[in-house]
């Protein structure tokens, strides 16, 4: 049986290097598979928003929502065959209903994302692009780029939904024009941007990037960096995801969000979470996000973060949409009945926030993210 990874197209099978040999145990496979199946059986659109309640004035941000596409309709997006041929990609296309007559897959994704976000109860979501891999001269290396979502396409999408979306472009510091690109994105209104070291093959701790991060600090733009183990796309080097490397970025004065807070599956090695927790003590401008932490493989590490008062106080809400949370994986903590109820929620964004709320972190971390990114309170 082909392992089903945590809610992302591609799965561990496409990983190169040491990650390629990793596999899930049977229980994890079954639980994750059940989550995908349950999601696939639920309609994801058309659910009416709940009446406004006492919390409706809360300002809540989901800091980690992906924009994806395969390039249909001239969006400029790219996705490798190793991903589009994968079971998870096909399951998501089916679940989200992205193959509809008269529309492109890229446009259908934008529509579903906007529709779910509008009825999620969130005030805003940061929509994330994905930069390419670059060679030593700073030119894109398309051979090594597994998926790509251009910043210009991101800005166009966000402009069409500016009441609910903010732009989180992606800038690989290895690109020749990295300093100009961060200035351009800032000029276009971006308050944050993302780097994905293990899939983009970039070492953020390389001293050659100091100037770039000084520019980020000068602009006051928040730097999101993927940390922890990646199970979704081909990994160039898993050690590039080490939270310890963020020290070089923090030392330039940047506010940094460690996406996934250095977490992994129990089968992953090395354990990168302690590096994240240790850095928190020394750097008040370091935060983590809870993206993908609602999935079965991350139950142990999410628990470790929530048990640590400092870590808990520095987590910002992120869903990692379109990859759905699996409330049943948390039944031991939140109870069977709650897990079952949460699993009935058809809106992925809403379900993820509700699960994290049940775990004692949801709305508070979403309000914290809103304050940090939209009100500049660090
Ligand atoms: Zn993500």
Image (cartoon, rainbow, N blue to C red):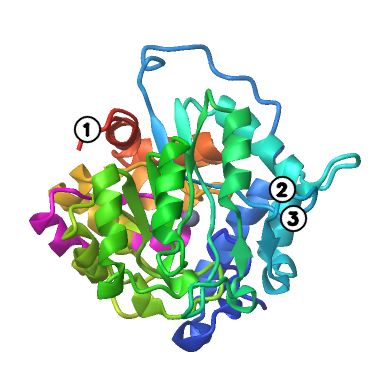
Residue 117 vs 176, above or below: the answer is above
From the image, tell me which residue sits under label 1.
377
Q: Nearer the viewer, residue 349 or 107?
A: 107
- Residue found at x 42% / y 12%: 53
The reply, left or right, for residue 349 in relation to residue 14 is left
From the image, tell me which residue sits under label 3.
71
Q: Is label 1 or label 2 in front?
A: 1
- Residue found at x 40% / y 70%: 229
Q: Position of residue 360 (x, y in %)?
A: 29, 38
Q: Which residues are magenta?
A: 276-300
Packing grade of label 2 (10 A; few <14, some 14-19, many >=20) is some
Q: CA distance from mark 2 to mark 3?
A: 20 Å
Residue 295 magenta-highlighted: yes
Marks 3 and 1: in contact by CB < 8 Å?
A: no
- Residue found at x 33% / y 52%: 223
Q: CA distance from mark 1 to mark 3?
A: 37 Å
Marks 3 and 2: in contact by CB < 8 Å?
A: no
Q: Position of residue 158 (x, y in %)?
A: 57, 35
- Quarter of the figure with residue 70: bottom right
Work out whether mark 1 precedes mark 3 in sequence or the reverse, and give the earlier one. Answer: 3
Packing grade of label 3 (10 A; few <14, some 14-19, many >=20) is some
- Quarter of the figure with residue 103: top right
The reply, left or right, for residue 304 in relation to residue 38 is left
Residue 313 vs 363, above or below: the answer is below
Residue 95's label in the rendered image is 2
Q: Secondary structure at mark 1?
A: loop
């Amino acid at each position: 049986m082909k392992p089903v990874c945590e809610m992302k197209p591609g799965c561990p099978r496409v990983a190169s290097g040491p990650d390629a040999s990793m596999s899930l145990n049977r229980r994890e496979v079954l639980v994750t598979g059940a989550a995908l199946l349950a999601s696939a059986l639920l309609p994801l659109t058309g659910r009416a928003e709940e009446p406004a309640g006492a919390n409706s004035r809360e300002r809540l941000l989901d800091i980690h929502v992906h924009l994806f596409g395969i390039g249909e309709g001239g969006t400029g997006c790219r996705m490798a065959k190793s991903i589009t041929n994968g079971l998870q990609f096909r399951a998501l296309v089916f679940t989200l209903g992205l193959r509809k007559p008269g529309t492109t897959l890229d446009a259908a994704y934008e529509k579903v994302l906007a529709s779910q976000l509008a009825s999620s109860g969130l005030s805003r979501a940061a929509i994330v692009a994905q930069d390419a891999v670059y060679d030593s001269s700073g030119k894109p290396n398309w051979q090594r780029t597994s998926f790509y979502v251009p910043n210009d396409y991101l800005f166009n999408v966000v402009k069409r939904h500016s009441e609910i979306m903010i732009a989180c472009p992606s800038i690989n510091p290895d690109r020749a024009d990295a300093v100009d690109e961060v200035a351009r994105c800032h000029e276009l209104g971006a308050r944050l941007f993302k780097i994905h070291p293990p899939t983009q093959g970039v070492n953020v701790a390389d001293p050659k990037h100091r100037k770039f991060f000084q520019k980020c600090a000068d602009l006051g733009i928040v730097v999101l960096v993927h940390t922890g183990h990646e199970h979704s796309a081909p990994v160039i080097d898993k050690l590039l995801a080490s939270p310890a490397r963020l020290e070089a970025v923090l030392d330039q004065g940047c506010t940094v969000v460690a996406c996934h807070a250095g977490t992994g599956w129990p089968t992953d090695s090395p354990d990168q979470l302690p590096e994240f927790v240790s850095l928190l003590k020394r750097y008040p401008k370091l935060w983590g996000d809870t993206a993908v932490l609602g999935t079965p493989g991350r139950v142990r590490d999410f628990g470790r973060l929530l048990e640590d008062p400092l870590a808990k106080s520095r987590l910002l809400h992120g869903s990692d949409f379109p990859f759905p949370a699996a409330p049943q994986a948390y039944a031991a903590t939140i109870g069977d009945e709650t897990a079952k109820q949460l699993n009935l929620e058809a809106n992925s964004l809403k379900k993820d926030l509700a699960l994290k709320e049940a775990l004692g972190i949801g709305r508070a971390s979403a309000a914290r993210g809103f304050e940090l990114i939209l009100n500049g309170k660090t």
